[in-house]
């Protein structure tokens, strides 16, 4: 697979507080499957850093944002009422441990359930821990239905991508 096109430009920025401007790299990256989409980033990486490395780092941003979205939606990262830093730190530590648990569960079951998500694990835990609201068969039926829908969306996106690459 061909890497996305990237351009690296040196940009001098002055923050109005420093005596001089500082050199930053402006990274402009075009997605292969969406040629009209451009991604822009500023980096203060060393001049020796390759353009490929900077483009890879920019592309990883999606996965970092996705992890935060899962943490906020399914683990309670955004649901805290801390009044002091120590309690906030404890809450974030618990959230990170829960994220680690979910990651390990997803990796453990990747062969049998490759589309297992944090939401799936949340539902499985909610229905198998003492407060059982549904039968195990119903939970597994719902999980299969979600995975079938995800697989259909993945296949549709792949078909669109192939169709757009032919144009």
Image (cartoon, rainbow, N blue to C red):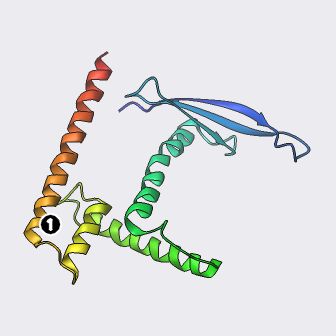
User: Percent from the top left, x then y, of residue 49?
Assistant: 63, 42
Most extreme residue toward the top is 167
- Point out the image quarter for the N terminus: top left
Most extreme residue toward the right is 19
Q: Residue at x 40, y 68 (%)?
A: 75
Return the residue nearer the eye: 148 or 58: 148
The quadrant holding residue 2 is top left
Q: Is residue 88 left or right of residue 47?
A: left
Q: Residue at x 26, y 22 (%)?
A: 163
The vertical placement of 147 against 49, above or below, is below
Return the residue nearer the eye: 65 or 51: 65
Q: Residue at x 29, y 68 (%)?
A: 122
The quadrant holding residue 144 is bottom left
Q: Is residue 113 left or right of residue 37?
A: left
Q: Is residue 62 left or right of residue 166?
A: right
User: In the rendered image, which residue does mark 1 sit on?
Assistant: 139
User: Percent from the top left, x then y, of residue 73?
Assistant: 40, 61
User: Percent from the top left, x then y, of residue 100?
Assistant: 39, 70
- Point out the image quarter for the C terminus: top left
């Amino acid at each position: 697979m061909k890497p996305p096109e990237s351009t690296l430009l040196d940009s001098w920025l002055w923050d109005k507080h420093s005596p001089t401007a500082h050199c930053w790299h402006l990274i402009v990256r075009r997605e292969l499957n969406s040629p009209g989409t451009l991604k822009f980033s500023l980096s203060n990486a060393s001049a020796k850093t390759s353009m490929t490395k900077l483009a890879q780092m920019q592309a990883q941003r999606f996965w970092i944002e996705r992890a935060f979205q899962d943490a906020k939606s399914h683990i309670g990262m955004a649901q805290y009422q801390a009044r002091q830093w120590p309690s906030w730190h404890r809450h974030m530590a618990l959230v990170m441990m829960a994220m680690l648990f979910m990651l390990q569960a997803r990796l453990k079951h990747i062969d049998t359930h490759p589309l297992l998500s944090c939401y799936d694990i949340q539902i499985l835990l909610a229905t198998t821990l003492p407060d059982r609201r549904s039968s195990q068969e119903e939970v597994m039926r719902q999980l299969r239905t979600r995975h079938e829908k995800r697989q259909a969306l993945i296949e549709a996106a792949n078909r669109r991508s192939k169709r757009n690459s032919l144009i």
